[in-house]
Image (cartoon, grey):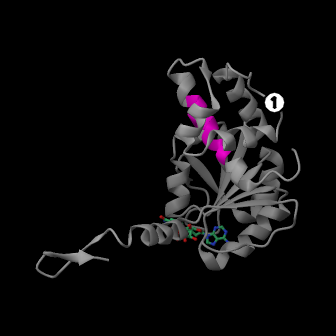
Amino acid sequence: MPKGVPSATVSRLVTYLRVLTDLERAGVSRTSSDILATEAQVTAFQVRKDLAYFGSFGTRGSGYSVHGLRQELRRILGLTRPWRVAIVGMGRLGQALADFPQLGEFDFELVAAFDVDEQKVGKVLGGVEVRHTDELARAAADLDIDIAFLTVPTPAAQAATDKVVAAGIVGILNFVPTVVSTPPEVWVETVDFLAALKRLAYYIKGRAPVIDESGVKVGST
Ligand code: NAD
């Protein structure tokens, strides 16, 4: 992995990959940084700069092979191998994620689920048997778990993270709206639904109508 690649670049590579996948599905064989830029809502300069961190891919004048660039991006992003996933916290969100059908489509395979609730341990929820978190270390070794989804209540987040780390799992997708401490070799990506909602409120606050008690629009926020 080249050093100094900004995280915003990595996020955009994921977007370019989605665009290329859509183009390939539509039967398009060649594309350009202009097309990728329009679809990803950035400039063509930005596309070329992002790709330049990893080498030189296109041909001046004739753009990129959709299939070739898609394969390169899959390789750069680490998506050419399957990843084995466990869910820690099989409550409402954990079960919903276990049920998410597209996980397997992208080579993320759900192989285990953990909880501390004795009512859930031993049951099959979202198609996967729930184990006690005390079994995390053994199961992680037996099942080669690479990634843990953290879906526990906030007060349990650090303790659950510590168990995930002790089990040797190096990737955590954290859905809990809090910061968890991990050693440097563990990468945590946070999916903060509430933060996104607050950002949304900021951007629409001047647009949403204010309705009075009788249902009449009286202005905007
Ligand atoms: P929930 O209460 O339905 O489920 C939490 C589960 O975690 C329970 O099954 C509980 O037994 C288990 N648990 C508790 N301590 C644990 C531990 N130490 N190790 C393993 N499992 C443990 O909660 P939820 O609604 O699924 O939310 C889970 C987390 O996701 C919360 O932090 C919440 O803020 C966040 N979140 C939820 C939603 C949502 O729509 N439900 C959306 C965004 C974020």
Of helix, strand and loop, which mostly describes the magenta segment?
helix
Name the residue: 51% across, 46% down: 100
**Residue 17 colored magenta?**
yes
Name the residue: 61% across, 51% down: 129
Q: Please, is residue 214 above or below residue 83 in the view?
A: below
Query: What residue occupies the far bottom of the structure in this picture?
Result: 213
Q: Where is residue 73 in the image (x, y as percent from the top left)?
A: 72, 34
Q: Please, is residue 181 above or below residue 88 in the view?
A: below
Please name the residue that numbered disc 1 is placed on: 56
Ligand 1 is in which quadrant of the figure? bottom right
Q: Nearer the viewer, residue 161 or 16?
A: 16
Q: Which of 5 and 90 is in front in this view?
A: 5
Of helix, strand and loop, which one carries label 1? loop
Residue 105 visible in the shown view: no
Q: Nearer the viewer, residue 57 or 118?
A: 57
Q: Position of residue 30 (x, y in %)?
A: 61, 19
Q: Position of residue 64 (x, y in %)?
A: 68, 23
Q: In the rendered picture of this protein, how many numbered marks are placed on residues?
A: 1
Give the class, few, some or many, for how many residues have Cα within 10 Å of label 1's Cα (few <14, many ≥20). Answer: few
Name the residue: 38% across, 73% down: 205
- Residue type, mark 1 in image: Ser
**Residue 169 colored magenta?**
no
Look at the image and give the residue range highlighted in magenta.
12-21
Left or right: 93 with respect to 188? left
Quarter in which the N terminus is drawn: top right
Name the residue: 74% across, 74% down: 159
Query: What residue occupies the far left of the structure in this picture?
Result: 214
Left or right: 204 with respect to 137? left
Q: Which of 186 and 196 is in front in this view?
A: 196
Quarter in which the C terminus is drawn: bottom left
Q: Please, is residue 77 above or below residue 191 in the view?
A: above
Q: Where is residue 179 in the image (x, y as percent from the top left)?
A: 70, 74
